[in-house]
Amino acid sequence: MRRRELLATGTAVTAAAIAGCLGDDDSADGYGPEQDSVPEERSIDTDAYELLEVGDVDVPLAPLEDVAYWYERREARFADTRGSDQHEDLRITGSALSSAPDGVSNDPVEDWSTDDRIVTYCVCPHALAGQRAASLIDAGYENVYAFDEGLEAWVAQGYPVEGERATQSLTSYQIRGRSDPAYAGEYVHARTVDADQSEVSTVEDDGSYELTVHFTGLEADSLLEIEAPDYTRELTLEEATDGVVTA
């Protein structure tokens, strides 16, 4: 199996939610709704999955094909690792909020068995998902996977989603910046100032970083906070996506 370090290098793509495939199950047990028909049982070699190195923890990356199979057979619980506003706007039907890196207050995952299969997901495609999966593995959960391709791929394939903006497109914004190369491998966060939405990436060896953010309800003058290891900037969306962000 191959190993990858935690990087978020998605491209700016808009994936429309498929009309007629929207779920209405508002439960928070992490399981999708009962299906009229389910895929036939098959074996999955999870030992062959790529591993994402998050600190000292190796997180297995589960591909879309297997994630959808578990979902349709209700053989995995799904944890949304983004912010609460992003979760309310658009989420995998039935998934529970458990924000990266360490969950939320009264986190529903705390009531799940450590033996349960858990799939963490985000949009970036697996930066936040990798962080939350690593913290769960470190806490003793034994069957945790980060969704490799992420929510954007799920939406593009027409799998069930729900939320206040579930019929809207999943729009991407590209933020590029530069930090000191001495901070290579450390995290960079982009957050909305007036809402609970966030994305994360890491500093490359040359000091550059790239964030593909999928925030909803933004205007050109919406304020974002860009937190690099060596500086924090508050910028409008227009400023953050125009040129290279520096100290």
Image (cartoon, grey):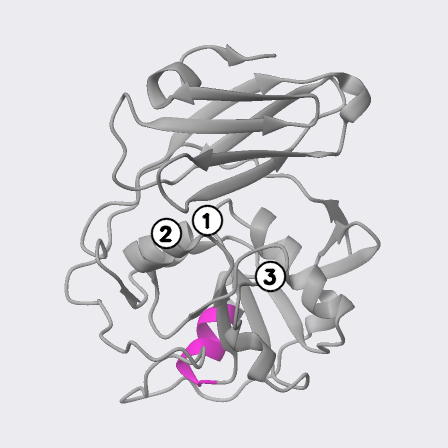
Label 1, label 3: how far apart the Cα atoms are: 11 Å
Q: Residue at x 71, y 60 (%)?
A: 134
Q: Amino acid at mark 3?
A: Ala
Label 2, secondary structure: give it: helix
Q: Amino acid at mark 2?
A: Gln
Q: Position of residue 25 (x, y in %)?
A: 27, 78
Sequence-first disc among 2 and 3: 2
State the residue lying farthest toward the right: 56
Q: Position of residue 108 (x, y in %)?
A: 51, 76
Q: Nearer the viewer, residue 222 or 242?
A: 222
Q: Residue at x 53, y 27 (%)?
A: 226
Q: Amino acid at mark 1?
A: Val
Residue tagged 2:
86
Label 3, secondary structure: give it: strand
**From the image, which quarter does the N terminus lie in?**
bottom right
| 23 w.r.t. 146: above or below | below
